[in-house]
Image: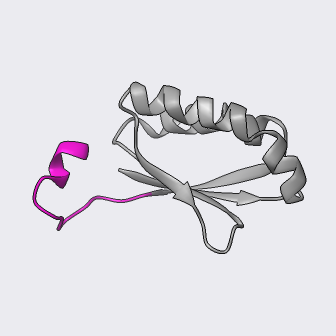
Amino acid sequence: MYIALLSYIRPLEEVDALLPAHRDYLERHFAAGVFVASGRREPRTGGVILVREHPRALVTEILEQDPFVKAGVARYELLEFTPSRMLAGFENYL
């Protein structure tokens, strides 16, 4: 499983202009079963996406297709981890 940490590197006005395309991107990957959860960071400096286990190269490729990244307004840090303890039922999302 992965935690993808998104950090904005351009002003929020530039980020906001790309929100509709970013939301479409998220929806595609939720529908495909790749993303588990996503949301804004607080304060609003970026976002977080929980990603199911896939080859790291595939996850990196998917993140590089984010309209925020393609437009140069944000970048990702990808953290890989193996859950060793979880709430009952969460194993369905691994």
- Can you give x and y, in whole percent of width and height, for residue 91 in the image? 16, 50
Magenta-span inclusion, residue 87: yes
Q: Is residue 59 left or right of residue 64?
A: left
Q: Please determine whether, in this image, residue 55 is positioned above or below residue 48.
A: above
Percent of width and height locating residue 14: 88, 48
- Residue 44 visible (yes or no): yes
Q: Give how far across and how far down residue 88 sits, in percent.
A: 10, 59
Furthest toward the bottom, the residue is 43
**Residue that sits furthest to the left in the current view:** 88
Residue in the foreground of this view, choosing between 49 and 84: 49
Identity of the residue drawn at 18% across and 65% down:
86
Q: Say which residue appears at 33% left-offset and 42% top-offset.
A: 53
Q: Position of residue 12 (x, y in %)?
A: 84, 58
Question: 15 above or below 62?
Answer: below
Q: Quadrant of residue 47?
A: bottom right
The residue depicted at 84 percent of the width and 37 percent of the height is 71
**Helix, strand or loop for the magenta stretch, by majority:** loop
Type of colouring: one colour
Q: Eyeballing the image, is 28 above or below 56?
A: above
| Residue 49 appears in view | no
Q: 53 or 48, which is in the foreground? A: 48
Q: Is residue 43 left or right of residue 39?
A: right
Quadrant of the drawing holding the C terminus? top left
Q: Quadrant of residue 11?
A: bottom right
Residue found 48% across the figure and 51% down from its top: 38
Q: How many marks?
A: 0
Magenta span covers which residues?
A: 80-94
Instruction: State yes or no: residue 68 in magenta.
Output: no
